[in-house]
Image: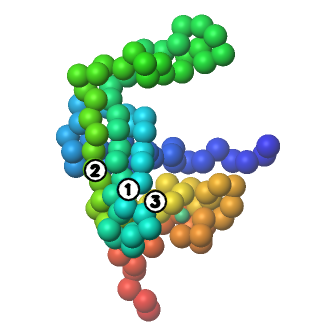
Amino acid sequence: MGEATPAYERVDFWNLIAQRKRGVPEGWRWFSIQGKGHPAPREQCTSIVTGAVCTATFKSGPRKGELNWAKRDRSTERELAIPFPEFDAFLLEWEAETGRCHNCYGNGRAFDRVCYRCGGAGKAPTAPQPAAK
Ligand SMILES: [Zn+2]
């Protein structure tokens, strides 16, 4: 509807942290995320991220082409406990690495609004800023 195509694709940080910090097999993707620990303070909560490698897709029917998780490679199934503080730190690490805002992936807009985190600039608020004149 007239919206410009975002310059950057959405990043799935759960898959990324699983690959980089937990060493999951190539092609691994999460299929379930559960928060544990509520209503404790956020820094004491953990996400249980479950995933596997799945390449099987539905061959027919309304879900044709979608992944058929029932046929996942169960030998690659892993349940990862990722504490919220570790996830939050990972987002900042990604921002430092890419210079992009993690909330909008660098597009300046998220959920059809100006991104609250970067104010629409798409730049990581945590990245080193040029020295003020
Ligand atoms: Zn942003």
The mark nearer the N terminus, 2 or 1, is: 1
- Ligand 1 within 8 Å of disc 1? The answer is no
**Looking at the picture, how far across and down is residue 21, in whole percent?**
22, 49
The mark nearer the N terminus, 3 or 1, is: 1
Residue of label 2: 81
Secondary structure at badge 2 equals: strand
Q: Amino acid at mark 2?
A: Ala
Q: Amino acid at mark 1?
A: Lys
**Looking at the picture, how far across and down is residue 111, in whole percent?**
65, 55
Foreground residue, 103 or 128? 103
Give the residue at x 36% y 20%. Answer: 72
Colouring of the image: rainbow
Residue of label 1: 36
Count of residue discs: 3
Badge 3: residue crowd in 10 Å (few <14, some 14–19, many ≥20): many
Quarter location, residue 77: top left
**Marks 3 and 1: which is nearer the front?**
1
Q: Please, which residue is most extreme toward the top here?
A: 60
Badge 2: residue crowd in 10 Å (few <14, some 14–19, many ≥20): some
Give the residue at x 45% y 73%. Answer: 125
Residue of label 3: 102
Badge 1: residue crowd in 10 Å (few <14, some 14–19, many ≥20): some
* Residue 64 as seen in the image, left or right of residue 73: right
Q: Residues under labels 3 and 1: Cα distance?
A: 23 Å
Q: Amino acid at mark 3?
A: His
Secondary structure at badge 1 equals: strand
- Ligand 1 within 8 Å of disc 3? The answer is yes
Residue 114 lies, with reference to residue 131, above or below; the image says above
